[in-house]
Image (cartoon, rainbow, N blue to C red):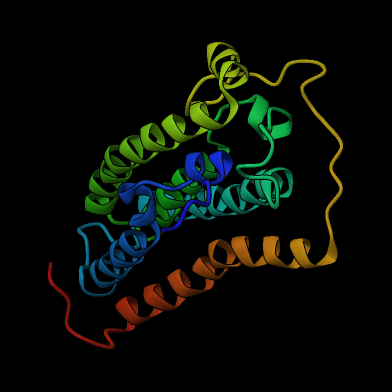
């Protein structure tokens, strides 16, 4: 009979089912997003207003990449071991998800597709609301009253203004820095992919659904 005691920290840091499904479901959603982007030609495509939206979308994608770089530099290697409350984590409790949301909105705008702009952000917010609640329950078990105090002063998702003294110094290894760059690569690569999709639609490389 096994009489070994389990590690309380390990027990409390176990992720829930909805958290474990986050990455695979995000990949599936990403593929669906790409299929719609490839084969749906929205009304008004390449109009002056659509082109303006495209440039705004590219700006949001760049903002998302920089924001996730900032957030990941603070939390990388510390998740579940320390309660991070400085830098972007002083703005909101989930800056990585917030900047991912900004990137998704940017991609939808850059693709000039009103349907994606209307549906994708709503689906993101609905699903990640459940993910965040599950993560918060785990963080409460890990950090207790410190996390409760943090929740009472910092908003969950929509950022507040950065207050004086809320920034902090970070020390990041070369390995973690490279991993962090990998985290934001896809947001910048999306700009190139979106331009290629625009060329394909403009030149009629294949048939589209109107």
Q: Position of residue 63 (x, y in %)?
A: 61, 47
Residue furthest out toward the left: 210
Expressed as whole percent of the image width and height from the top left, the position of residue 82 reads 69, 36
Residue 132 appears in which quarter of the rendering? Answer: top left
Q: How many marks?
A: 0
Q: Is 94 left, or right, of 41 in this rendering?
A: right
Q: Position of residue 50 (x, y in %)?
A: 36, 53
Image-based side of 88 in relation to 40, left or right? right
Q: Residue at x 73, y 49 (%)?
A: 73
**Residue 92: image x %, image y %?**
57, 27
Residue at 83% across, 31% down: 168
Q: Which image quarter: residue 27? A: bottom left
Q: Nearer the viewer, residue 5 or 70?
A: 5
Looking at the rendering, which quadrant does residue 26 occupy? Answer: bottom left
Placement of 103 over or under 154, stated as above or below: below
Q: Residue at (46%, 47%) from the top-left corner?
A: 14
Q: Is residue 51 positioned above or below 31 on the image?
A: above
User: In which quadrant will I find the N terminus?
Assistant: bottom left
């Amino acid at each position: 009979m096994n009489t070994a005691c389990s590690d309380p920290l390990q027990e409390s840091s176990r992720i829930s089912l909805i958290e474990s499904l986050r990455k695979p479901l995000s990949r599936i959603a990403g593929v669906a997003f790409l299929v719609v982007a490839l084969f749906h030609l929205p009304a008004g495509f390449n109009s002056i207003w659509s082109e303006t939206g495209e440039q705004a979308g590219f700006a949001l994608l760049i903002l998302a990449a920089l924001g996730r770089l900032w957030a990941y530099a603070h939390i990388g290697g510390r998740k579940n071991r320390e309660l991070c409350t400085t830098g972007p984590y002083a703005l909101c409790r989930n800056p990585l998800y917030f900047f991912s949301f900004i990137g998704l909105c940017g991609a939808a705008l850059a693709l000039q597709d009103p349907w994606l702009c209307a549906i994708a952000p709503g689906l993101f917010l609905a699903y990640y609301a459940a993910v965040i609640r599950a993560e918060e329950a785990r963080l409460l078990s890990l950090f207790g009253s410190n996390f409760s105090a943090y929740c009472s002063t910092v908003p969950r998702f929509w950022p507040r203004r950065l207050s004086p003294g809320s920034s902090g110094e970070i020390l990041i290894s070369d390995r973690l820095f490279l991993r962090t760059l990998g985290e934001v690569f896809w947001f910048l690569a999306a700009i190139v992919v979106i331009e290629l999709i625009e060329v394909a639609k403009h030149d009629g490389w294949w048939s589209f659904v109107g």
